[in-house]
Amino acid sequence: MWKAMVQAKRATVQLCRSVAMVFAMCLFVCVLLITALGTLAVVGAWLLPETLLLVRRIAGAKRFLVATWTGREVPQAYQPVTGRLRQRLRIVLRDPGTRSDLRWMAAFYVYGWIGLLAVPLWPLGLVVDGVWSGLLRRQPVVLPLISRLADLEADWSAALLKPSPQALLAARVDELTATRAGAIAAHEAELRRIERDLHDGAQAHLVSLSMRIGLARRAYDHRPETARRLLDEAQEQAEEALAELRHVVRGIHPPILSDRGLVGAVRALAASSGLDVVVNVVGLADDGPRAPAAVEAAAYFAVAEALTNAAKHSGSVRASVRLERLRNAVRVVVRDEGAGGADEAGGTGMIGIRRRVAALDGTVTVTSPEGGPTAVTVELPCVW
């Protein structure tokens, strides 16, 4: 009996929120819609996009309430509303998400009042269920109906608020457009970095090498000691140029990834990071199936950047890296016990990681509360 009362109380709170939402919608949203669609064409045209954006927020609040009750997130898919008035009007009126929200709102005006049925069920349940369970030792039958009402209302809302296939397709197109733009920007930035490294490093050493070899040829017959010294300097320049070229190659695709795989490469990174790094590996093996090269490279650079940031900014001397093989993905978690409060806008490292990962349809999550710890989680889709 007590358990049924507690559950009925939770359901009543959920139903009361729905009734309050219906009441508020009747008072405010209808007035705004009538004004926007009224005789004042100019004011109505300006108000209509804002009204439909308000409908989005109300639908979002309802999605949150449904997810709180059911434990299942209700997805949403909207087109961003930007530009001038005519463009904003066109977007909100053509967006499939707008039509879904309006259908839900129209239906919610009808079934949203279902929560009022909980009012008579409470006294009836206390009497009937009290006798039923207290005297006859049977399970309550009336109070559980309140929870079923809340389940029914949540199921209806979830079904109506679920994005249509057209809305999901439009959202996916927008996401892929943004991902493509980010991948192009990351590619251009990578090309500029390679060009800069070659120009400032290897090319400068090769120019100096060519000059010294030319001077040595001129001095060879008349000043052999000078020629020998210039050749020694030329050899040093050649070695420095090779080192610069190796550095550039490592920045494009680290050879250690090809030689030792992701696990071995990350362990090498951890050993050379300057921090006390613990590497935990779950489901991956040096001699087991390997992820595609692009996935390994993205995971490797994410670990490298996260460890570099931890060494520079966290103030911690310890960090951990977790490599985990999922069913259809690779998950990388880099965690440090530093001061926290990481600001992604403070540099380009995390932006580069996000663009590289987004190009592979992956996700990056950064949690860094003040006082720490900081954790960077990267998930990359992968077909094993």
Image: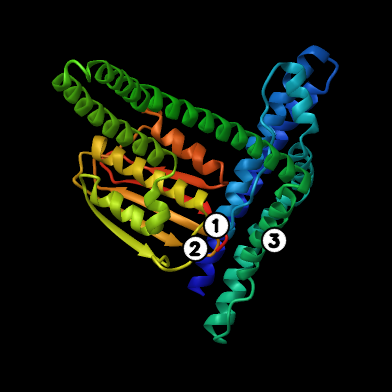
Residue type, label 2: Leu
Q: Residues within 10 Å of mark 1 (few under 14, many from 20)?
A: many
**Residue drawn at the location 79% of the way across and 30% of the way down:** 93
Q: Are marks 1 and 2 in contact (CB under 8 Å)?
A: yes
State how far apart marks 3 and 1 are (Cα): 38 Å
- SS for callout 1: loop
Disc marking residue 326 = 2
- Image quadrant in which the C terminus is located: bottom right
Q: Are marks 3 and 1 in contact (CB under 8 Å)?
A: no
State how far apart marks 2 and 3 are (Cα): 35 Å
**Residue drawn at the location 65% of the way across and 44% of the way down:** 76
**Residue tagged 3:** 152
What is the x, y in percent for residue 27?
Answer: 70, 33
- SS for callout 2: loop
Query: Which tag, 2 or 3, sits closer to the chain's start?
Result: 3
Disc marking residue 23 = none
User: Residue 248 occupies which quadrant of the picture?
Assistant: top left
Q: 338 or 98: nearer the eye? A: 338
